[in-house]
Amino acid sequence: MMRPDIDVDQHVVTSVDTLLECSRRSSEDGQHRLGAEQSEDALASPTATALQRAQARELLTLHRLRLGDYQACVQQGLLALEYFTETGDLLAQSNVHCTLALAFTDTSLNETALRHVLGALGAARACGNPVAEFWALSRSSLVHGAMGDAARSVDLGTQALAVAQTLNDQETSFVALNNLGDTYLVMSQALQAHDEDATEPLNEALTLMRAAAALAQEQGNPFNEALARTNLVSILIKLGQHDEAREHGRLGKILSRAHGYRSLEIDIDAQLAELVRAAGRFAEATSMMEAQLADPDIEEEPKLIAKLHRSLYEMHKAGGRFDKALGHHEQLHAVLLRTTVQTAGLQSQMLINTIEMEHARHELERSQLEAKMARLRAEELDAQAHTDPLTRLSNRRALDRELPWMMGLAQTGVQPLCAAMIDFDHFKQVNDRFGHGIGDEVLTTMASMLRTITRGTDLAVRVGGEEFLLVFSDTGLDEAAQACERLLASVRSFPWETLAAGLACTVSVGVAALEPHETVSAWLARADAALYTAKHAGRDQVTVAAPDRAAPVGS
């Protein structure tokens, strides 16, 4: 279902982006039932991406809130929030948190609402968006007010107004003024309930609400103006300024009736009845209130119904009409009981939905953690299988795995490849004279030296005992020989006496470059032969193997 002002061929599947845009515009127009249908169509589309589904859920969260469907609001909001948290979209997180905070506040789940406003404020400040920060502060003020923390509510509302004034936006300025004024009104009601003077907060509320009404009138927004005038009537009645209250009520009713704001019109009618009652015209006030109770349009306004029954009960009781007073008292009790039961049931279901969502998320996180642990264990076992336990260098198994692809690159002419066979000179004497413990320390020290002359693309292997192999990738014979000369110099100059007094070590090296079509065994045999040439020539030196022109063809 689409907005009437958007021309869409009914035989053409509407794109998901178009549905989302229509849903946003429906929200701005207050057409929440239509907007919910558009969001659901987007969500059900088989072409919708994960992001589009999350955006549809975000919109649906707001639409369901405005339609009073709190369970669906929370369900969709938590799903949207999960996606935006995973993707790190802080602005979207803040927006969804704000909507969920309203849903939980409306159902008196204030502690849960508080968690969401804290999340909204944190996300808004983290992404540095002042508009999001304004809405988060505004919702925070509302939640603290619902929790009875009037001082904190006013402080947050004042912060929201300060942010709004920096935005140069009339809509946020109106909301800030209207909400802060309403916060002072609620504060005054709490004071009056305890027989305390509420004049100061009422005057603060009056100043703010007059500014809100003037701003709404200036921007030509009839709904905002009607809303502000409705709030002004409530404030002025409490201050005893009945003439001005009646004028605002009259103007607000004209606006509400002209633009079809039926809910506001009903509220104003109830306020006008209270004004008549305050003037002492009880019969007229009674007639007005009973007429309202007979209006089917207020069936879904339990707070207003309770207020009317309470007023009628008080007026009939004061007038000695006890039977009628009792009837309204019983109906008041029934309305309050029904509302309490409905709210309790709704709270339970919302909490169950929240717990189920959190449980599902925890199960997903647990399964992901288990998969990660299994992968890490597999990687650890693989590393153990391909690593020499003493030196932590690669072992022969790693050599068998890595060498084929390195040789493939070399034999296709992409990269030259050189092997260096390295062996300690007279290592048996080290073990015999200083012990195998010192011998192991010598080998681990050599492993550290090898790491300093190799790159991530090279391969350093302990092939057994005191013998090591270096495979230099993309390295010519001269460069490999120079690297090995540097290694020999490092071994000579190393302070071996720090490991054991009188200890000195040298190594011999044989280097060979891989020839075209040469086999692994032939290549490494040439490097090994060069090593033994270095040994026979006096040790502590590098010998470069001559190319084998008669190398056999093989793989």
Image (tube, grey):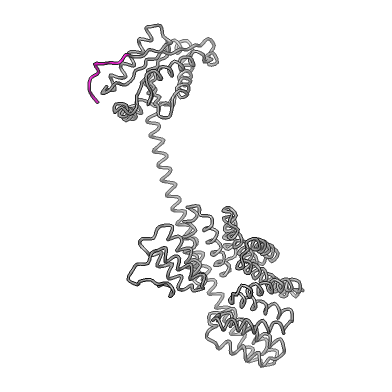
Range shown magenta: 546-555
**In the image, 297: left or right of 217?**
left
* Towards the viewer: 248 or 116: 248
Which residue extends farthest left? Answer: 553
Instruction: Name the residue rendered at 34%, 16% in the picture.
Output: 527
- Percent across and percent down for residue 94 are 55, 59
In the rendered view of the protein, which quadrant contains the C terminus?
Answer: top left
**In the image, 546: left or right of 553?**
right
* Towards the viewer: 24 or 456: 24
Magenta span: chief secondary structure: loop
Q: Is residue 447 above or below residue 507?
A: below
In the rendered view of the protein, which quadrant contains the N terminus?
Answer: bottom left
Residue 553's image quarter?
top left
* Towards the viewer: 550 or 379: 550
Q: Is residue 248 above or below residue 497?
A: below
- Percent across and percent down for residue 434 are 49, 12
